[in-house]
Image: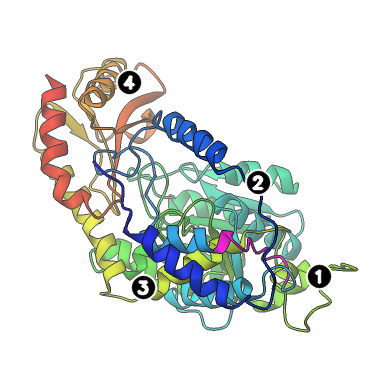
Amino acid sequence: MTFERDTIKILEKALSKLEEGFEAFPDGEHRYDIEKIEKVMLHVAERMQDNYPYFHPCYAGQMLKSPHPIARVAYMLSLYINPNNHALDGGRASSHLEKEAVAEIAQMFGWKRFLGHLTGGGTMANMEALWISGKLSPGKKILASEQAHYTHARISEVLGLPFQAVSCDKRARLDVGSLEKALESGDVGTVVATIGTTGTGSVDPLQEILELKSRYGFRVHADSAYGGYFTLTDTLDPDTQRAYEGLVNTDSICVDPHKHGLQPYGCGCVLFRDPDVGKYYSHDSPYTYFTSSELHLGEISLECSRPGASAVALWATQKLLPLVHGGEFAQGLSKSCRAARSLYKKIDSDERFRTLFPPELDILVWAPNGKTASQISQRSEKLFRAAAEQNIHIATFQYPSALIRTQWSDVTFDRPAVTCLRSCLMKPEHEKWVEKIWNTLQTAAQ
């Protein structure tokens, strides 16, 4: 295969255009040894060959998706200036681009009035949301499902807030009955609703959580780091669609443009429905914010220096691929959903395998058949390696036995977790690759 190179030509034209804005300045003294740079870069390229093909449809394991070509080239162009979006003095143009791009993300969720900015990733975005929760409800508990991202427990510990995991239903979604029991203690400040778990892509029942909020008075934070963008698709089942419709009524939202937003790492985003929470970020800097009376992004962020290049790449991508229902970007997400469902049907109809439940988004979990949890786990490991030998890369996933017992009633569970296989079909191209992946898995299963 060959990598896309056409945008390198566009970068050269864009770089010439960028130079026009700085014609008043004399050339600096650039004394770089090009031959040495080339030697090192060729060595880097050789070392980088030691990677799985994350960019290719034959990779369907972890949540890894290549940036769009326009994101790559916009990011590279920005690096010639290397703006810092902490303050307007260090990132004037890129700060404005960030505000515009983040406003488009907020609009995607139905918010026109909000406070938000980009972050280094989902972990930092979730941390800021829970930090604000701690400010508004000091000392009160954070609740999230057992299948929520592990960082919520870690973040709560860092913030000095108590954390409690709530059990899940058989589809790996937060169990509403268990949640209400936990709420009866009266010491809960925030409930995290996961919109697309990293394990199974499951979507918590957000509408039911919001109904409990009206009775118990806690904040709702939507961790949609993985699944947020699927609000633009028309391929969700009714229950999942209903959950997405509740996002507009949450208190804060996290979404990761570096997952389904076609961006390079790291690019996360945190949004607050009430802009007044910005008062908790207030701080003084004797030298950072003197250049403008406008709001500096560093005044509403826990992070200090932040790459303006991320904002430039995101803005350019959203101009090319607007965040609208039915648009090219949304269609790409729909293709991923259809790919996951297509592969699920093939696996589910083959007696050599076991499935758990149909995918809500573009992730499915399954396993080779077996009589015991240990046998299924051993066969999963073997199939994982056999598929990789044929250049189809999937992932393994430790799934709690407690969540599978009722579905796999004929299995003897001799261990607390079962090693299953996990396929993340997050590239639009996967829709055309399902047959190839399936044929390889069948061969590997032999």
Q: Secondary structure at mark 3?
A: helix
Q: Can you give x and y, in whole percent of width and height, for residue 378 in the image?
A: 29, 16
C-beta proximity under 8 Å, tags 1 and 3: no
- The quadrant where residue 227 appears: bottom left
Whole-number angstrom distance, CA of label 3 to CA of label 4: 50 Å
Q: Identify which amino acid the numbered label 1 is placed on.
A: Ser
Q: Identify which amino acid the numbered label 3 is placed on.
A: Leu
Q: Identify which amino acid the numbered label 2 is placed on.
A: Ile
Tell me the mark number nearer the camera, choosing from 3 and 4.
3
**Relative depth, front residue between 68 and 187:** 68
Mark 2 burial class by Cα count in 10 Å: few <14, some 14-19, many 20+: some
Q: Quadrant of the N terminus?
A: top left
User: Considering only order in the chain, which callout, 2 or 1, is on the residue closer to the N terminus?
Assistant: 2
Residue 157 appears left or right of 327? right
Q: Secondary structure at mark 2?
A: helix
Tell me the mark number nearer the camera, choosing from 1 and 3.
3
Name the residue that disc number 2 marks: 155
Instruction: Give the extent of the magenta segment.
Output: 78-87
Q: Which mark is residue 320?
A: 3
| 339 lies above or below 398 | below
- The quadrant where residue 327 appears: bottom left
Whether residue 79 is in magenta: the answer is yes
Q: Which mark is residue 282?
A: 1
Whole-number angstrom distance, CA of label 4 to CA of label 1: 53 Å
User: Considering only order in the chain, which callout, 3 or 1, is on the residue closer to the N terminus?
Assistant: 1
Tell me the mark number nearer the camera, choosing from 3 and 2.
3
Q: Can you give x and y, in whole percent of width and height, for residue 430 in the image?
A: 21, 49
Q: Identify which amino acid the numbered label 4 is placed on.
A: Phe
Whole-number angstrom distance, CA of label 1 to CA of label 2: 21 Å
Name the residue that disc number 4 marks: 413
C-beta proximity under 8 Å, tags 4 and 2: no
| 46 lies above or below 363 | above
